[in-house]
Structures are given as C-alpha cells and as structure tokens.
Amino acid sequence: MTEHTVSRVCTNCGAERTGPFCSQCGQNDKHYDRSLWRVLGDLLRETFDFQSRASRTFVKLFRHPGAVSQEFRHDRRASYVSPIRMYLFTSLLFFLVVAIIGEVRSDPVLGGIFLNDGFDAESSEQTTTTTDFTEALERLESVTNESTRQLAEEILTRSSESNTRPMLESLLLSVGEPQDVPEIARVALRTAVKVLHDPEELGDELQNNLPLIMVILLPWLVFASYLFNFTKRIRVVHHLVFCMHVFTAVFVVWTFKLILSEWIVTHDLTEFVFSTVMFLYIYVHIYLAYKNFYSDSHIIALLKYIPLLLFTHLVGLVAFASILLFTVVNL
C-alpha cells in the first residue's frame, strides 16, 4: 500500500469500508505506513480537535447551563467531550488540588482543631504535668491497653502550646472506673488517643477517602432527579449525564476557588466575599441548569430545586460523617 492509495477494506476487521470510518469496528482509513511528518500531522490534528471539543464543551457548560446535557439527550454529542471523561478529569483535578494544598477547607475539624486554629492553648488553665495524671493513666490502661497509655504519655510530654495536650487532659479526667465503662466507650477512647497522638494522619487518611463521597452523592442525585421528574419520562441515563455535568461545573468552580484562596486571596474579608460569591454562583448555575434541562418554569423549577438541594446537602453531610467515622475507625 502506498501513500496515495487507500484500501476500501478495513485492515482491522476485514469489512468493506464505504467511507473514512469502518461501519463495523469504527477504525478510520488512516494508517502508519506513511512518512513521519504526515503521521505527526494527523496526531496534532486529533489533539487539537479534542482540545477544540473540550473548549467548546466547557464554554457551553458555563455560558448556557443545562444546554450540553440537552444536546446529549437529543443525541447531538459529536461536538462535545463525553460527560464521563469530563467528570473524571475535573474530579481528579479537584482532589489533586486539595492534596497539594494540604487541607480540607470544608472540614471545620481539620481546619480548626488540627491546624492549630480552633484551640488557644495559651488560654487553657490546665497546666498540670504528666505526674498529675498517673491515676488517670492507670484507669485509661485498664479500660484500653498498654499501647494506648504509652501514646497518651507521649502526648502529655508535649509543650503546653500544643492543642492536643489540653484535649487529652480533659479526656483523661473523664475516664471512669473500668466497671463503669462500656465496650463502645473503650473503643472510642482508644481511637481518640490515637487521633490526638497523630492528628495529621487522620487528615491525610480523610483526604484520601474524600472521593468516596461522590460514590454516594452521584447515585443519590441521579435517583432524586429521576424521582422529581418522573412524569417527564426521561431515561435514567440522561439524568446521569445531567448530574455528571452538574458535578463537573462544581468541581471546576471549586478548584478555581481553592487555588485563588490559597495563593491569591489572602485578606480575611476578601476571602469571605470571594467564597460567598463562589457559593452563590454554584447554586445559581445548578438551578439554571436544572430549569433548562427539565424545561420547567421558574416556579416549578424552584419547587423542585429547593427540596432537592436540601436533601442533597443532608445526604452529603451523612456521607461525610460516614467517611469520617470510617477513617477514624480504620486508623
């Protein structure tokens, strides 16, 4: 085969080709038995074609909320990037940024207690030393184990400026006699001491487990959208596409917010205003996407959107609490 001849038989499956693409397997009529420059030219064109589709998809996603989902619903998808690819890319980018920044801003526990912002050790009136807690440490060992006591002793040797030491001291003072401590409280004590001994480990593990929230939220939002619009006879797959586009927009906006908040927006008031604007933008964007995709009036859309939003936040809180509990228990 030369560079000037094109086979009318697909070299991949052997079927007769009637156009540039095989009707059986989808392979195009391009091949690698050509000069290097022509092959590289094809690769560049394919790359820029993907970038063109990506830019077209993201521009329409934000300029016309819900329109891309409508295009997929009406099977006009060739000009856009697939929703699953967009969803995976933007979610991975978001969690990568979270990992780079090194904190989970949406978690007040990590942002306050574990990042030394939520407890003022200087104001604590408890300045007792390790020897004052000998009896409490013995009770702790009797209801847990020796390794838990060793971890507690290491915490008590830390500087008084450490926020974990006063918290452990309060915990030790609350430990009762062995016969009065139920098994679930013993497990909680072991876990609490382990967390106080190395709070950064909890933060790292929680950060790694955060993507699991989407395993709960995405199916829930698909189910709720289907339930709220049952009379419209829209297939579940179209609800799924719509929800993926919604989460894609949220991931993009929130990634943008995290980056600016960390490296550009430094003043507290400016950060508050910026965060508020980002939150409002996300809620308005989702509402417009919801209204446009399901072709509802503003009144009908609001009557559906508000309870759906409230239920989704509730499910998100339950999902986060479950993952936090899972993370703590598996430390």
Image (spheres, rainbow, N blue to C red):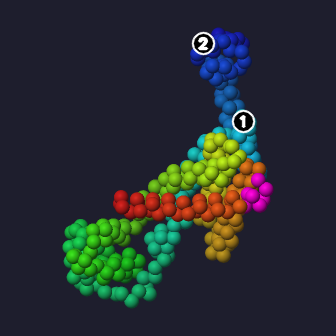
- In the image, farthest residue toward the bottom: 125
Q: Quadrant of residue 278?
A: bottom right
Depth check, mark 1 against mark 2: the one in front is 1
Residue 190 coordinates in the image, percent (x, y): 30, 68
Magenta stretch encompasses residue 210: no
For residue 258, say whether it is visible: no
Residue 239 coordinates in the image, percent (x, y): 65, 46
Which of the two discs, 1 and 2, labels the residue nearer the N terminus?
A: 2
Q: Amino acid at mark 1?
A: Asp
For residue 297, say whether it is visible: yes
Residue 282 coordinates in the image, percent (x, y): 68, 60
**Which numbered marker is on residue 75?**
1
The residue that appears at 46% across and 73% down in the rendered structure is 113
Instruction: Provide the residue span drawn in magenta.
Output: 296-302
Q: Which residue is mark 2?
A: 14
Magenta-highlighted stretch: main secondary structure?
helix
Left of 50 or right of it: where is 184? left
Q: Quadrant of residue 14?
A: top right
- In the image, farthest residue toward the front: 231
Crowding near the residue tagged with mark 2, few <14, some 14–19, many ≥20 C-alpha atoms within 10 Å: few
Left of 205 or right of it: where is 104? right
Which of the pair 313/208 is nearer the observer?
313
